[in-house]
Image (tube, rainbow, N blue to C red):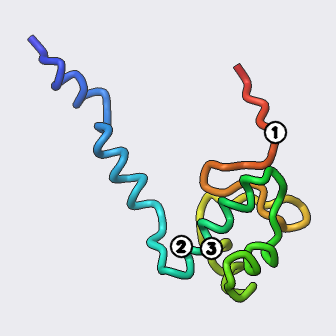
Amino acid sequence: MVTRQEEKEREGASVEAMADAISAAMPRLDAAEQRIAIGTYRLLADGEPVSTAAIATATNQPEDRVEKALNSWPGVYRDDDGRVVGFWGLTTARLDPEY
């Protein structure tokens, strides 16, 4: 007879293993990058695309530093004008999920 735990192990990764994998995939942020990330979230929460210049102003960081950070991180989505429209799970774009 197979135990429930053995069934779970056969099914794939545990929740803990998945959490560890996700955590490992995220960049480690220094203090400036933390300000950039938080500032980006705050600006996107207004519901409009955000320019690099706006993020730089809001976070008191040089624009080239903001651009470098955004370009190096996964999960940053931009529109045709280069403005951030999606960032680590938050988006200004209308989502149209398929069922």
Disc 3 versus disc 1: nearer the observer: 3
Q: CA distance from mark 2 to mark 1?
A: 27 Å
Q: Position of residue 25 (x, y in %)?
A: 45, 60
Label 2: state its secondary structure: helix
Front disc: 2 or 1:
2
Write down the residue under mark 2.
Answer: 34
Residue 96 left/right relative to 68: right
The three-letter amino acid code for the residue at tag 2 is Gln
Q: Nearer the viewer, residue 11 or 76?
A: 76
Q: Quadrant of residue 72?
A: bottom right
Q: Which residue bears the numbered disc 3?
A: 36
Q: Residue at point 67% right, 73% down?
A: 71
Specify which label sits upstream in the sequence, 3 or 1: 3
Q: Which residue is mark 1?
A: 94
Looking at the image, is 7 positioned above or below residue 33? above
**Horizontal side, residue 81 vs residue 67: left or right:** right
Image quadrant containing the C terminus: top right
Residue at horizontal 79 percent and vertical 61 percent from the top: 78
In terms of depth relative to the viewer, which is nearer, 8 or 29? 29
Figure check: 77 above or below 68: above
Query: Horizontal placement of 63 versus 17: left or right?
Result: right
